[in-house]
Image (cartoon, helix red, strand yellow):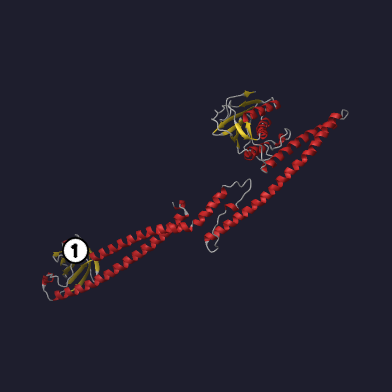
């Protein structure tokens, strides 16, 4: 059970346990020593009483010893005589100074015990405990004198009650004060925990990481454990910050190199493509192998140009370059993109579903068209002929929802974690043949993120669904979902084919 307690609870419980143990130990020792002292005093009083009774008994024949008059004899005193043959007679002087003879059962306690020194005997019949001492008489009988331990018991009980009350009060006060003291002592730890929680929520995988702004004033006193922890935690954050700064500087250099290289490669690639086209078209007498080589140069230059354009776009997105901010009709974007895909591949079944009410977002129309076109091209490249590909548009809770669904074989599970990373390919053997650069889905993720949206994917054999969520420009009522989109997003069909 203690495993689930907080450090504050454990510290308070530990302090209270030690305090209770110490207080209880002191109380028990006090009770033991006080009882021993009271018993010693009672024994001394018992000896004095026995001596007085013995003096009276030595001059009084027979039962005259039982003639209590109360002079010099304490109340609740027991006096008896045990003859050598075992016959006993005894009486008890109660608090009202009345003489009460002992019963048979009470006399048996006297006759069955050797009382050479003061001992505690418990008598039945409600008489209670007595400290009893036997004094020998001249006729081989024994004079038995006893004093009640009632006062000792009452005193010990009262002391126990006082100790218990003090123990409870001490624990309550200690719990209240200890809670405040521990709370103040653990305040630096709470600041460290809060800082760690804030750092855990930072997007450390992208953008500029500013840990220094999140580090509060932490205790760094090397003479205290909390200060040592605070100093170590601050040094750790500073080390992590320096590592992130180095990573960011390195990534910035790479992005700048990619952007510069991509920009510089556009002109020579265009020249290579132009010269190859010109040579191939004007060289009617060229051998077939030369003509084929020129055709390959032209096609590779086209592919290389597309790769350079994609790299340049990603570099600009990484730098946070501003996109155009215009009202965009997503329905028109989907219709145009599906029309282009249908013209590119007639072997697939293309379908588009958009609502009658326009769904408007603020963004760059060309880039949003590129997002949809890349997803449609991804479905075309990685699904067999005859696959149905559906582009659906809808809205929900102030956001525009786009889904691209295909009935292909699905995405391999091992590709899903890196699907939106750069140069990720589900089928490397055919990606080059189909012209894929491995940057299409990375561009999708980058453009959608630049529009403050998000893209997700769900795939299984026979169905793959890409979902894009973008903030709408104007509030609009929810559009009923399309039955063809597996995610439950879309609207009644507009065109199909």
Q: Residue furthest right?
A: 285
Front residue of 253/414: it is: 253
Disc 1: which residue:
108
> Is residue 461 in view from this perspective?
no
Q: Residue at x 16, y 76 (%)?
A: 55
Above or below: residue 306 compared with residue 139? above
Depicted 374 relative to depicted 225: above or below? above
Q: Nearer the viewer, residue 374 or 406?
A: 374
Q: Quadrant of residue 289?
A: top right
* Residue 316 shown left or right of residue 85 in the figure: right
- Label 1: state its secondary structure: helix
Q: In the picture, which quadrant includes the C terminus? A: top right
For the residue carrying disc 1, how many other residues have a C-alpha within 10 Å: few (<14), some (14-19), or many (20+)? some
Q: Position of residue 347 (x, y in %)?
A: 68, 25
Q: Nearer the viewer, residue 262 or 428?
A: 262
Q: Position of residue 297 (x, y in %)?
A: 80, 34
Depth order, front residue of 134/371: 371
Q: Is residue 258 left or right of residue 334?
A: right
Q: Name the quadrant containing residue 39.
A: bottom left
Residue 214 horizontal side relative to residue 166, left or right: right
Measuring 53% from the left and 54% from the top, which residue is drawn there? 192
From what the image shows, is residue 324 above or below residue 243?
Answer: above
Identify the residue at image location x=17%, y=74%: 52
In percent of width and height, residue 317 lies at 67, 41
Q: From this viewpoint, is residue 225 visible?
A: yes
The spot of residue 436 in percent (x, y) is: 71, 35
Q: Total number of numbered labels?
A: 1
Residue 11 appears in which quarter of the rendering?
bottom left
């Amino acid at each position: 059970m203690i495993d689930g307690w907080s450090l504050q609870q454990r510290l308070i419980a530990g302090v209270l346990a030690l305090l209770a143990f110490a207080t209880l130990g002191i109380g028990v020792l006090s009770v033991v020593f006080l009882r021993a002292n009271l018993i010693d005093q009672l024994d001394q009083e018992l000896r004095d009483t026995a001596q007085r009774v013995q003096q009276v008994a030595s001059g009084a024949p027979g039962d005259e010893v039982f003639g209590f008059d109360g002079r010099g004899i304490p109340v609740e005193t027991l006096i008896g005589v045990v003859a050598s043959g075992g016959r006993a007679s005894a009486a008890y002087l109660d608090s009202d100074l009345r003489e009460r003879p002992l019963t048979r059962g009470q006399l048996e306690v006297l006759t069955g015990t050797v009382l050479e020194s003061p001992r505690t005997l418990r008598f039945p019949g409600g008489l209670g405990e007595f400290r009893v001492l036997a004094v020998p008489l001249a006729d081989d009988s024994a004079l038995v004198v006893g004093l009640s331990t009632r006062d000792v018991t009452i005193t010990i009980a009262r002391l126990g009650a006082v100790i218990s009350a003090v123990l409870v009060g001490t624990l309550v006060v200690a719990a209240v004060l200890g809670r405040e003291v521990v709370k103040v002592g653990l305040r630096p730890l709470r600041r460290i925990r809060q800082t760690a929680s804030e750092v855990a929520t930072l997007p450390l995988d992208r953008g500029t990481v500013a840990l220094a702004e999140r580090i509060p004033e932490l205790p760094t006193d090397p003479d205290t454990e909390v200060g040592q922890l605070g100093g170590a935690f601050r040094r750790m954050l500073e080390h992590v910050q320096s590592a992130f700064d180095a990573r960011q500087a390195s990534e910035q250099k790479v992005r700048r190199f990619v952007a510069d290289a991509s920009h510089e490669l556009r002109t020579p690639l265009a020249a290579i493509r132009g010269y190859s086209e010109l040579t191939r078209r004007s060289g009617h007498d060229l051998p077939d192998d030369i003509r084929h080589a020129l055709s390959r140069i032209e096609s590779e230059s086209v592919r290389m140009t597309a790769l350079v354009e994609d790299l340049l776009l990603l570099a600009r997105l990484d730098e946070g370059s501003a996109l155009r901010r215009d009202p965009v009709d997503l329905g028109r974007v989907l219709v145009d993109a599906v029309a282009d895909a249908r013209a590119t591949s007639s072997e697939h079944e293309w379908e588009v579903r958009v609502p009658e009410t326009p769904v408007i977002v603020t963004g760059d129309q060309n880039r949003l068209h590129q997002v949809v076109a890349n997803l449609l091209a991804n479905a075309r490249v990685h699904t067999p002929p005859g696959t149905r590909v559906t582009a659906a548009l809808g809205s929900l809770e102030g956001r525009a929802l786009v889904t691209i669904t295909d009935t292909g074989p699905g995405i391999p599970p091992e590709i899903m974690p890196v699907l939106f990373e750069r140069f990720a390919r589900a089928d490397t053997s055919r990606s080059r043949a189909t012209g894929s650069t491995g940057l299409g889905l990375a561009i999708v993720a980058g453009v959608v993120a630049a529009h403050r949206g998000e893209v997700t994917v769900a795939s299984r054999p026979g169905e793959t669904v890409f979902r894009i969520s973008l903030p709408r420009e104007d509030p609009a009522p929810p559009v009923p979902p399309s039955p063809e989109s597996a995610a439950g997003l879309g609207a009644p069909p507009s065109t199909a084919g």
